[in-house]
Amino acid sequence: MPSTPLFAPRRFFAQRTPSLFGAAVILYLTGVVSVASGIPFVTQTNGFSFSIGAMLVALLLGGAFGAAGIWVVSTVLVYLLSQAAGGSGSVARTAANVGWAAFPLLVVNSLSTATVLVLFFTDRLPAITVPGAMPTWLVVLNALTGLAGYLWIGHLLTYAISDARDLDVRRARVVAGLVIAIPILYSVSLLL
């Protein structure tokens, strides 16, 4: 069985040199899937009726900008924190590994988006009268899947950092923990 970053990250990063192209595809798909989950809510709260073309452009551009933002911020943060921890290695390798380590975000966003789209297309999506006021159960679902996803990313990111920045696993785990701390705290805050 081939190694995968999702379930065997230590082996995956030790045996392969992840590509920047693959990382870009993972993050772009993550962005597109994430933006897709919001389209039903935008049409519901604002009363706008978007054409298919406008929705497609919003989906593709929103996905691209979201992916680029996540990738750049994460890569810079990992690079600088791992540099402070004594790491060495290229920015390109760091960016590729960070992108591949974000794979669980695609899985988690797909689950959340599939839930919203199934509810939308079966006319069971709860009405939202105020922008940002999602039903409690949907907030809890997103918070729990987000929490699980970021913990999963932290696990993958540990081995991605260790490989890209030539750090021992213990130091890489500290860097990964710092990188995912804010999204985890945000997910937990949604549950309080």
Image: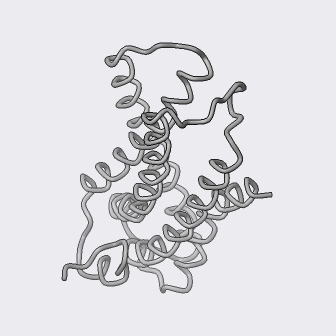
In which quadrant of the rendered view does residue 2 lie?
A: bottom left
Q: Is residue 100 left or right of residue 157?
A: left
* Count of numbered tags: 0
Residue 183, position as x, y percentages in the image? 63, 57
Picture layout, residue 38 above or below residue 73:
above
Point 68% across, 42% down: residue: 135
**Quadrant housing the N terminus:** bottom left
Q: Foreground: 147 or 91?
A: 147
Residue 54 at x, y = what percent? 37, 17
Residue at figure coordinates x 24%, y 52% from the top left: 21
Residue at 48% across, 39% down: 37
Taking depth in this image into account, of 162 and 43 the one nearest to the observer is 43
Quadrant in which residue 62 is drawn: top left
Q: Position of residue 111 (x, y in %)?
A: 45, 54
Residue 67 x, y percent position in the rendering? 42, 43
Residue sitting at x 62%, y 61%: 144
